[in-house]
Image (spheres, helix red, strand yellow):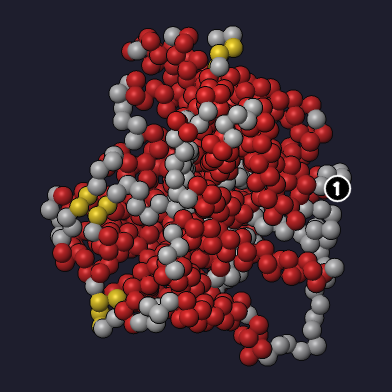
Amino acid sequence: MSLADPDMTPVPRQIPDRLASPAAKLLKSWESLLLLVAVGVFILNCFASPYFLDAWSLSDATFNFTEKAMIAFAMALLIIAGEIDLSVASIIALCSTAMGLVMQMGGGTGALVFTGLAVGLLCGAFNGVLVTRLGLPSIVVTIGTMSLFRGISYIVLGDGAFRGYPSAFAWFGQGYVFWVITVEMVIFALLAIVFGVVLHKTNFGRQVYAIGNNSTAALFSGIRVGRVKMILFLLTGLMSGLAAVCLTSRLGSTRPSIASGMELEVVTMVVLGGVSILGGSGSIPGVVIAAILMGLVTFGLGLLNVPGIVMSIFIGLMLIGVIAVPRLFKMARGK
Amino acid sequence: MTAILKHREVLLTGVIVALLALIASRFPGFVAPHNLVAVFTDTSPLMILALGQMAVILTRCIDLSVAANLALTGMTVALLNTVAPGLPVAITLVLAIGLGALMGAVNGLLVWKLDIPSIVVTLGTMTIFRGIIFLISDGQWVNAHEMSANFTGFPRIQILGLPVLAWIAILAIAAMGLVMSRTVLGRSIFAAGSNPHAAAYTGIDVGRTQFAAFVISGALAGLTGYLWIARYAVAYVDIAGGFELDVVAACVIGGISIAGGVGTVAGAVLGALFLGVIKNALPVVDVSPFWQLAISGAAILIAVAFNARAGRTKGRVILKSAEHAA
């Protein structure tokens, strides 16, 4: 930050002679750019591997992003409101461990799903209370709970694992609704619509943006900032619980290291989707396209036999790149 | 103000001493001098990293890439050692510090020049560094027998009853103490963190100060990278995985405010020692090492809640939610 920083020397806003037409605005938006890139990657993948363009392998590829995207929707709202939750992957571990315990006690599929969602909600409530009631910064709180939640999993499981989930439970992560349409895809699509409507078409959504842009102003204009943030933490916990149900069902086992590092991919997905990490802006369609794009990239690289850890280089580069490149362009134009 | 801050370090020292007394009441062997030296030596990497992290957090940033930086530097010098076993340790040290500083500079430049939030930058570089380790090592381990004796032996050399590793930690603490209290850079780090706008108006380039903090953190991570690999005599992709959380935990426990501008060298060191004593005590009191992650998580939460309470009684923060949003 220097004296020429935009924060400190406010530049008067220019009022244009006329507003850009909605169509032109849509064309120039981050979402259309992402879509373009996604289509590009899709076409590249078609050339890169003959096994790519097949309904079944494409259906398999969606597992790369559906679980992460479930969390990413809630995380997008949380980041738009100016908070963050780095504990999501650890919530998955704790939910999955709890489900394993219930399974050992002879719980059926219904009990397992209930446990997963309930523990997720509890974890979200724990984060939310610490952030909103005690006024602690969410980044430290969730770094702490990231260790705590996964730590509890390690205490319960040590270096062991839970196996032997009931076969009916496998439906969530391995089932198909119709032809190649998986259960997870349906959940993903439904959540996309629900979160899209909530964020873009309801009062609650507007409140989320208002808090992210200026939480003090939001407070003084009558928005219950603490309550909205609490709801968002609960939602993130619940979605992590749902992701835990799907992931545990798909893997059919629980280890304490389950989903480790997933928080990074979820945050990357959200930021790639055009949500400002500083809060206040972003959209659900952007996150949806970013999820699909990340799925396509990892699937494409996987078909080319690129090992997972090398893929993570691409994810890290994408995370920094999507923020850095527009800023570099802006700097180049400014000079 | 200073009285309260001092009070905090005294308090933490008291907690650590009480913890030691508690363990000693059951297991007197734990507080034998040679064991305390072992605990201090074992905690040295954490202390060195916490010092760098402290500088970064003071400027309102965070460095989550330290463990990956450590691992990449460690792997690089280990591979170098297999190729050139005769390389003097002094050169290895310089290389490790330089390489670490370079990685810190990458973080710092992205934060300074492009104004990208540090958490995004370092989450990104964390995975990139880990990925690069895989690329350069091909996923292979470098084992003890592939390293030369002077490479692995250096941190263990005893001087005046303490191993070199512990001496380096003491040296790093002393150096950081001097930098933070006696140099322009140290004062700028505090100023940039406690009020960036005021700092900018007094002629401090906040971005450059943050850059400097990242370079310090990176250099210390690089140094620790060599020491770590040499001490454990093994290098692999996931080495020190998740250690960045311990480092942040040490700082938070030591009373370094994540909102920037508040914290001391003594706090960072004591925070690290607190975690170090717990980690070393767990096997002694016969608790499974799997408890450690949960305990350090709980310690972070208690410490940060405690910090917030201490801050509140001072009545300094008026618009709390606005401060956190910033």
Q: Residue at x 35, y 31 (%)?
A: B289
Residue B21 spot, x, y in % from top left: 42, 13
Q: Chain of mark 1?
A: B
Task: Please tell me whether residue B257 is drawn above or below residue A284 in the rendered image.
Answer: above
Counting labels gives 1
Residue A207 or B161: which is nearer the viewer?
Answer: B161
- Examine the rendering and report whether any part of residue A308 can be seen: yes
Residue at figure coordinates x 47%, y 38% from the top left? B142
Residue found 37% across the figure and 41% down from its top = A151
Q: Is residue B176 left or right of residue B67?
A: right
Q: Is residue A123 left or right of residue A30?
A: left
Observer able to see residue A31: no
Disc 1 target residue:
B201
Quadrant of the drawing holding the N terminus of chain B = top right
Q: Quadrant of the C terminus of chain B?
A: bottom right
Q: Nearer the viewer, residue B138 or B272?
A: B138
As drawn, B204 above or below A212: above
Q: Nearer the viewer, residue A96 or B76?
A: B76
Q: Residues within 10 Å of mark 1 (few under 14, many from 20)?
A: few
Furthest residue toward left: A106
Give the secondary structure at mark 1: helix
Q: Residue at x 32, y 41 (%)?
A: A154
The amino acid type of the residue labelled 1 equals Tyr
Q: Position of residue B51 (x, y in %)?
A: 63, 32
- In screen coordinates, is B146 left or right of A13? left
Question: Does residue B73 lie above or below A56 as drawn?
Answer: above
